[in-house]
Image (spheres, helix red, strand yellow):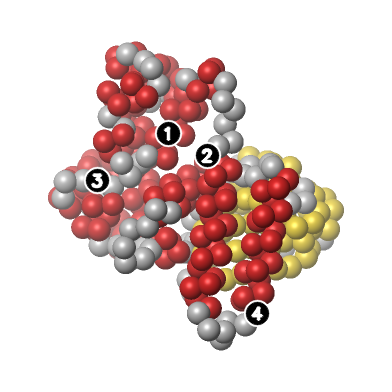
Amino acid sequence: MKRYILHEPFSIYHFEADVWQHSVHKHTYFEIIFILNGSGVHHINGHAYAYASDDVFLLGPEDFHHFEISETTEFCFVRFNESVEKQQQEAAWQPIIRTLLSTSSQSSNSIVTDKQEKQKLRHLLAVLEAECANEKSAYFDMVRDSILRSMLLVLARNLFNHSPADDARKYSVEAILMYIRQHIFQPESLTIGHLAMRFNYAPAYISLFFKRHTGESLKQYIIRYKVRIIESRLLYSKHTLTEIADEFGYTDESHLCKQFRKYTGISPALFRQRG
């Protein structure tokens, strides 16, 4: 399968098409896809989703997709790598964006359904495109990154608050899965005891409940999901093993290496080298 590469931290691609010209492909970057006009079907990771004007999709590096256009479609692709969430000191928005980006492959359908939220994103996109038309303007990089972060925070708000508030949903396995994805960088929030208390289950029962509905133990799912994100870090970032270990709450680099080797069969260094 073809993999598209982004050779710069950011790019924006605005175009109109009657026929989709690209084969099924993956990327080395993240991608916010705006459907400005038109309709058709978006095929993501083997699933088909109808799309229409004002839909917004978020794809991660391991997602594969292509479009089937029914009505002439105006697209805008905002492409970026993980550097958007980096700055010297931890800011309040960083954990939210990290969670969103690690959840991107779980959010295959259009993220935003609220009309006002869609309008906000359209306005942000218009400002972003206007800024990108004059990249030599003062503070361009900072303004661009600020707008992009605002987009991602709006997407996060819609994705994480999209679940209905009824009790059946609250205690469903989907709610547990979403909670795990949102807190994957906070190991203290993912202990059996904490999850049991959070979802009002007995510790022994929540493990049985989770395995019955997913076919995998709670502990195994958390570790495998974490390892999958670490694989992306190794392939698509320049983080050192020490930095990755610290980000995911490992006691040290050797602990990360031991667990990674157990679940993949190779060391993180060799995985990065082969990638």
Q: Position of residue 70 (x, y in %)?
A: 82, 50
Name the amino acid type tagged 3.
Gly
Q: Position of residue 269 (x, y in %)?
A: 24, 59
The residue that disc 3 covers is: 249
Residue 98 in view here? no
Q: Position of residue 216 (x, y in %)?
A: 38, 25
Q: Earlier in the sequence, mark 2 or mark 3?
A: 2
The quadrant of the image that shows the N terminus is bottom right
The residue that disc 2 covers is: 160
The residue that disc 1 covers is: 179
Q: Earlier in the sequence, mark 1 or mark 2?
A: 2
Q: Position of residue 77 (x, y in %)?
A: 64, 63
Between marks 4 and 3, how big is the CA–CA gap?
41 Å
The residue that disc 4 covers is: 133
How crowded is the residue under tag 2: few (<14 C-alpha within 10 Å), some, or many (20+)?
some
CB atoms of marks 3 and 1 within 8 Å? no
Question: Which secondary structure lies at badge 2?
Answer: helix
Name the amino acid type tagged 1.
Tyr
Name the amino acid type tagged 2.
Phe
Question: Which secondary structure lies at badge 1?
Answer: helix
